[in-house]
Amino acid sequence: SAPNSVGAQVDHKIIGIDPGAGLMKATEKAMKDYDLKDWELVEGSSAAMTAALTQAYKDKKPIIVTGWTPHWMFSKFQMKYLDDPKGTFGKDEQIHTIVRKGLKEEQPSAYAFLDKFSWTPADMEKVMLDIESGKKPEEAAAEWVKNNEATVNKWVEGIQPAEGKKLTLAYVAWDSEIASTNVVKTVLEQKLKYKVELSQVEAGPMWVGVSNGDVDGMVAAWLPTTHADYMEKLGKDVEDLGPNLQGTKLGLAVPTYMEINSIEDLKK
Ligand SMILES: C[SH](C)CC(=O)O
């Protein structure tokens, strides 16, 4: 590509996240669909990607990252998704709550709440931004629960507290799921008196843990496309309680100070 092409400017690198994320599979597919032969998708983690983005943005340097909505990067920075004319990244998706088989019989209160839990991208982004600006996840979650009493009470209305019973939730350290899982933990503990343990794992082990009953559930299933592989393999061994958030989005994201507007522009 030309010496001052965007490829040359970013050393033909797209800064990705953990390899098990569906977003990474979608990006690999996009690199094929758009024939980005000499490009590399850098594997790492959500934290490493946001650190690289923060540094590049501070230095007003070009950077292309695997992005998703909800995410604080779109409110903290001036960011834009690259157009995806081939539709590789799919359309609006949802985040689902998935629980182990048997939870309904053994932990009816937790099951009833997890079935009711649902909130908006704005709710999630508020908690994410508080965590990004330095609050501990449990603090940001407790604050959101305190400030959203009406919503929370609707979630737990008529559900019997489960004094001291134990519950384990799995999640992957994506900024969005750190926020949602801590809010769910706070409600289970404060309102339903469960003792909740969080298990931070990669995406594959998260799905496997719920399917074999090692963990009680998770609120981190990006469907229908992003986690389609996991759902295909393990869907019959879990119970899908449906969406807890509507209107997610995946794609390649860049600071608005970059001229490019489409994935097609990466080929030049
Ligand atoms: C990075 S998104 C939160 C989820 C996924 O891509 O699997």
Image (cartoon, rainbow, N blue to C red):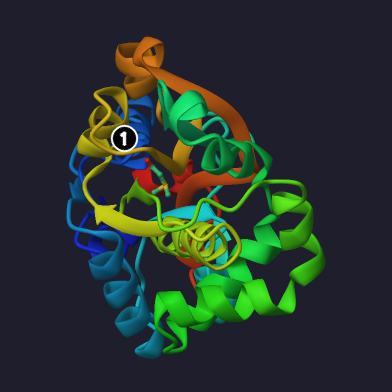
Q: Position of residue 99 (x, y in %)?
A: 44, 31
Question: Which secondary structure, mark 1?
Answer: helix
> Which residue is found at the position 55% from the left and 30% from the top?
90
The total number of labels drawn is: 1
Determine whether 89 is above or below 48 in the image: above
List x then y, in percent, for residue 110.
Answer: 53, 43
* Front residue of this view, candidates 183 and 113: 113
Q: Amino acid at mark 1?
A: Met
Name which quarter of the figure residue 202 lies in. top left
**How far from the left and from the top, in percent, is residue 207?**
30, 31
Residue 222 percent coordinates (x, y): 48, 36
Between residue 259 and residue 40, name the one nearer to us: 40
Residue 154 vs 243, above or below: the answer is below
Q: Residue at x 58, y 28 (%)?
A: 241
Choose between 253 and 250: the one closer to the eye. Answer: 250
Quarter holding ligand 1:
top left
- Name which residue lies at 44% across and 87% down: 135
Picture layout, residue 260 above or below residue 30:
below
125 to 184, vertically: above or below: below
Which residue is outermost to the front?
163
* Residue 15 visible here: no
User: Which residue was labeled with disc 1?
Assistant: 31
